[in-house]
Image (tube, rainbow, N blue to C red):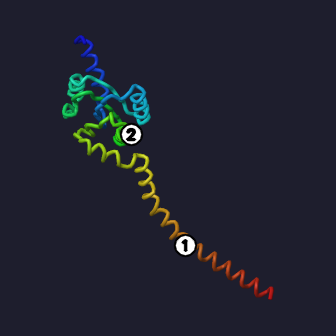
Amino acid sequence: MPTKEKAEVIQGFSEILKGAQAVYVSRNMGLSVAEVTELRKQLRATGAVHKVVKNTLAIKAAQAAGIGGLEAYLSGPTVITVSMTDIVAPAKVLTAYAKDHEKLQVAGGIVEGKAQTTADVKAIAELPSKEQLVAKLLGSLQGPATGMVRVVNGPATNLVRVLAAITDKKAAAQAA
């Protein structure tokens, strides 16, 4: 590959890496085109980019983007997954796909500027998704408010019940 083309690849991949929340490296040991296409489709649904870049060019692009430590994972046939927003969803997809397809191995990566091993990526994949965390937070915030409403409404509700019971008792006494 001529130097100009290499420089363009480095520049383009460096732009992708800038601002990335997570960069995962996997080893592709012979996945078919259909399998890689399916994996890319699943990763694209999470907002991640799944690219094959020569290791030497990827190292230079990572250095240009200010991402250190990626070179430790770049050996052999590798594929790089970059996520700008969500760190959990791409990890879930990669680890689940690696369980079903032995030819894909998650090597590690860089998450929020820190190096992650294969075990770390698997642990990240077990975290709840962003939507689940937001739902839990909203439930936690809503709990005290709901309790307060019940406490405030309690006396009024009890008064209505007592008055209804008195009315029913008087109606029964008049009917007898």
Using residue 68 as the reference point, say whether residue 20 is left or right of it: right
Q: Looking at this view, is 153 or 8 the one in front?
A: 8
Q: Residues within 10 Å of mark 1 (few under 14, many from 20)?
A: few
Label 2 amino acid? Asp
Q: Position of residue 61 (x, y in %)?
A: 24, 25
Q: Residue at x 25, y 22 (%)?
A: 54
- Front residue of 141/126: it is 126
Report the mark closest to the observer, 2 or 1: 2
The kind of secondary structure element at disc 1 is: helix
Q: Amino acid at mark 1?
A: Gly
Residue placed most toward the observer, 50 or 13: 50
Label drawn at residue 154? 1
Q: Image quadrant of residue 107?
A: top left
At x 28%, y 32%, the residue is: 27
C-alpha separation, residue under disc 2 versus residue under disc 1: 55 Å
Count of picture labels: 2
State whether residue 146 is above or below residue 172.
above
> Going by the image, does 118 lie left or right of 152?
left
Residue under label 2: 100
| Residue 158 percent across, percent down from the top left | 59, 76
